Amino acid sequence: MTGNSSPVLLLHGFWFGSWCWSEVAGHVAGTGRAVLAVDMAGHGLRARWPACLSRRPFDPAALPVERSPVADVGVEQAGDLLVSQIRRLGGGRPVTVVAHSMGGPALTWAAQRAPELVAHAVYLAAFMPASGVPANDYSVLPENAETLVAPSLQGDPNVIGALRLDLASADPDYRRMLRRAFFDDIGEAEAEAAIGLMTPDSSTALGATGIELTRDAWGSVPRTYVTCARDRALCPPCQHRFIAEADAAYPENPTGVVALDSSHSPFLSMPSRVAEIIADLP
């Protein structure tokens, strides 16, 4: 075993669940390290689906307007849950935490509140907002203009309190857009299976609050950012902006950067490589 030998906690992003890390976790476990993939607040086993999706006959007019049952899940709830998950895995020892996409703000919250518990913070194509800046603000920046997530959303997020995907849509163009947004470098069958495991709603509240960061907390935790060059969910220019802002704020603790030639979900397209990155952390 090389690099950091701390336990590894794997946190997914919006619409995903702990299931997406199964291949990576297997590779990491093979190195002899303790590893745990967890569900973020409002996702996986903690997800709640809008009632209109199970009501029959299905009313398509309800999909873009029904208030989300996870609308109240904010970054504080997600971050506090993550801290408890870190404590459980590490038993008080520091843990390496790998966060994907909108799992990034939860990791940032945890590292700011309990920096002694985070041995290394790894942001995998993840939101890593600057101090006090809500993660949602980055979604609408020019650096993220080529995202395919925005045109995939159903309804007004301000009305339903969530970013909602129509995962059951039979529209071939819409399904193709979902695959391009999240799974552009895996086969169609595997991508469709992954879409079948996703949950439709992710709370806008989770990215609505800026987290005030300090030099002796989040700013002191070793961090690595893994960029994904073919990402059409969180676009590469936005990923590089996160890195630049963090390094400008904390130049004494620069961000390690690893580049992947992948789309938004390298835990599915190149799980062994993701596991290698984790194993090689300093």
Image (cartoon, helix red, strand yellow):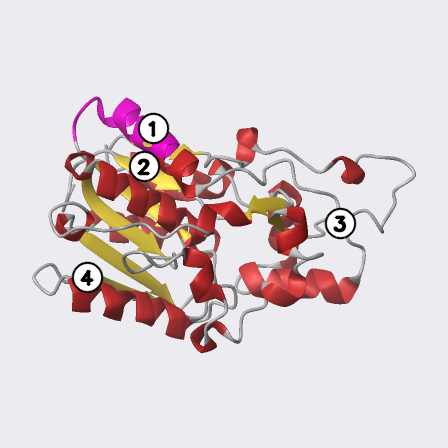
Examine the rendering and report whether any part of residue 162 can be seen.
yes
Q: Where is residue 234 in the image (x, y as percent from the top left)?
A: 46, 64
Please provide the residue range marked out in magenta: 80-93
Please tell me the numbered disc located at residue 255.
4
Q: N-terminal of the two: label 3 or label 4?
A: 3
What kind of residue is marked 1?
A: Gln
Q: How many marks?
A: 4
Measured from the top left, where is residue 78 in percent x and y?
A: 42, 37
Look at the image and say whether residue 42 sits in the magenta stretch. Answer: no
Task: Indicate which disc, 4 or 2, sits on the residue closer to the N terminus.
Answer: 2
Q: Name the residue under label 1.
A: 85
In front: label 4 or label 2: 4
Determine which residue is flagged by label 3. 65
Identify the mark nearer the N-term, 1 or 4: 1
Identified at 60% across, 59% down, the residue is 187
Q: Distance between the residues labelled 3 and 2?
A: 35 Å
Q: Is mark 4 on a helix, strand or loop?
A: loop
Q: What residue type is labelled 3?
A: Val
Q: In this view, does 223 lie to the left or right of 54?
A: left
Which residue is depicted at the point 20% across and 53% down?
223
Could you say whether the residue bearing mark 3 is in a helix, strand or loop?
loop
* Disc 2 target residue: 9
Please tell me which residue lies in front, 23 or 88: 88
